[in-house]
Image (cartoon, rainbow, N blue to C red):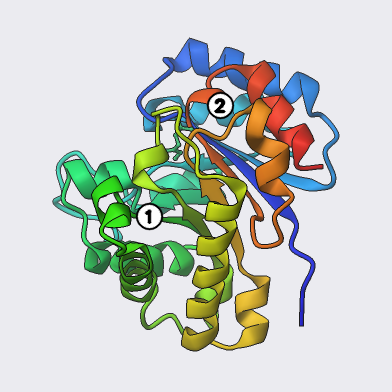
Amino acid sequence: MKKFRKKIIAGNWKMNKTVAEGEDLATGVKRELDECPDVDVVLCPPFTALKSVGDAIADSVIKLGAQNMHWQDYGAQTGEICPAMLRDLYCHYVILGHSERRRDFKETDKVVNLKVKAAIQAHLVPIVCIGETQKQREAGKTEDVVRDQVTGSLSGLGDSITKLVIAYEPVWAIGTGLTATPEQAQEVHAFIRGVLTDMADENSAESIRIQYGGSMKPANAAELLSQPDIDGGLIGGAALVAGSFVEIVRAAM
Ligand code: 13P
């Protein structure tokens, strides 16, 4: 049965914005979106700006997210951040398995799976990223790649599988200005929901939100967001300017 899924628009600032710049951007977004009951809005600044951005949005509907974390509770992991540290800063969400981390830091589905479990355990909502490269798409392997990433990253979650958000981000569309057409994106989103149905059950699969990411911007957001299985967006470049991010949120209302 088709379920209502509240749209979720998240800004992934990646390695951009100092403390002061982040505070400015968050304040700009908040000024425009003080009331936004129909859409979940999330800002994911770099670790160093989590505190200032969190303070800037504290009395608003906007939620805070991080871009990564380690799966262990604490310990000798130089340079890493654990779930409790994110909770401490009032993070609600954490992006996990972004393709830039899979590519540059060799994060595997197995590692992503450990992180997803640790996030849920810590009451953080994981935004789990998946998506194929251009080469894989051209070789006709999109479905195989996406199925492997979903089953690998989300294995062994049981009923907790409903406590996460998935972001379908075709690697070829990230930061390139190339966007999947609404039809291309919808096709993969529907396929992902089918994989989730096989892993859990239809009810659970219908309740999980699947965001699209990859050059989503004000000009294409409304059309992408009107697709039946596209439940939001994970925004990179266009989230770095308050005006364009807010326009995308409005397109989701
Ligand atoms: P762009 O919106 O810059 O293509 O980035 C998408 C992305 O990677 C969000 O996580």
User: Which mark is in front, 2 or 1?
Assistant: 1
Q: Regarding mark 2 in the picture, which secondary structure is present there? A: helix
User: How much space separates mark 2 and mark 1, taking CA atoms?
Assistant: 20 Å
* Front residue of this view, candidates 180 and 225: 180
Compared with residue 136, is residue 29 higher up or lower down, i.e. above or below? above
Please tell me which residue is depicted at 38% across the width and 68% down the height of the picture: 143
The reply to whether the residue tagged 1 has its Cβ within 8 angstroms of ligand 1 is no
Mark 2 lies within 8 Å of ligand 1 (Cβ measured): yes
Q: In which quarter of the image is the C terminus?
A: top right
Residue 129 figure quarter:
bottom left
Compared across the picture, whether 235 is left or right of 9 comes to: left
Q: Earlier in the sequence, mark 2 or mark 1?
A: 1
Q: Would you say residue 100 is visible in this rendering?
A: yes
Q: Position of residue 128 (x, y in %)?
A: 43, 58
Q: Residue 101: x percent and y percent?
A: 26, 45
Q: Which element carries disc 1, helix, strand or loop? A: loop
On screen, 205 above or below 146? below
The answer to whether residue 100 is above or below residue 52 is: below
Q: Which residue is drawn at 46% across and 50% down?
A: 94
Query: Toward the viewer: 83 or 159?
Result: 159
Task: Give the labeled residue for mark 1.
Answer: 131
Camera sees residue 123: no
Disc 2: which residue: 239
User: Which residue does the image show at 66% across and 27% down from the upper left?
Assistant: 219
Task: Give the side of residue 37 with respect to residue 245, left or right.
Answer: right
Compared with residue 218, is residue 80 higher up or lower down, i.e. above or below?
A: below
Residue 80 lies, in percent from the top left, at 24, 44
Q: Which residue is drawn at 74% across and 63% down?
A: 5
Snapshot quadrant of residue 132: bottom left
Q: Would you call the spot at circle 1 few (<14 residues within 10 Å), some (14-19), or many (20 or more)?
A: many
